[in-house]
Amino acid sequence: MKTILTHHDLVAEEVNDEHGHAILLTQQDGLEEPRSVIAHPWQLRAVCEHFGIVASDEQAAKTIQTLQRRMKGLLGC
């Protein structure tokens, strides 16, 4: 698994700090200094579940995967 993900101006990187395993998120904001935040992976998961980006329910996750496959089929991907 890659330890760094870059998506547009956002960089996510696996790090180990004094509290253990964490994710460092850094984003460039125009010409100013980049802004960073360190979060535990479970914190990121909780945020994604809260906003419906990732399903915490296993059945819901299966349904989402099925719908994603069907949408890709409709789009011809």
Image (spheres, rainbow, N blue to C red):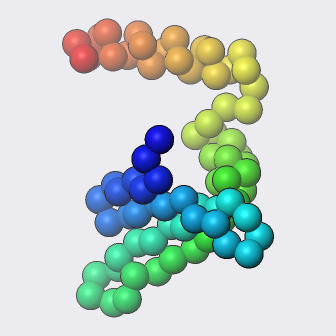
Residue furthest toward the bottom?
A: 32
Q: Quadrant of the C terminus?
A: top left
Number of marks in the image? 0
User: On the picture, is 14 further left or further right than 70?
Assistant: right
Residue 76 spot, x, y in % from top left? 22, 13
Quarter-of-image position of residue 28: bottom left
- Position of residue 12 relative to residue 46, above or below, is below
Is residue 51 among the parts visible in the rendering? no
Is residue 41 among the parts visible in the rendering? yes
Q: Between residues 36 and 47, which one lies in front from this camera angle?
A: 36
Residue 35 spot, x, y in % from top left? 46, 80
Name the residue: 72% across, 15% down: 59
- Position of residue 2 relative to residue 74, above or below, is below
Name the residue: 35% across, 57% down: 6
Residue furthest toward the left?
A: 76
User: On the picture, is 5 further left or further right than 53?
Assistant: left
Residue 22 spot, x, y in % from top left? 65, 62
- Position of residue 67 relative to residue 37, above or below, is above
Name the residue: 33% across, 90% down: 32
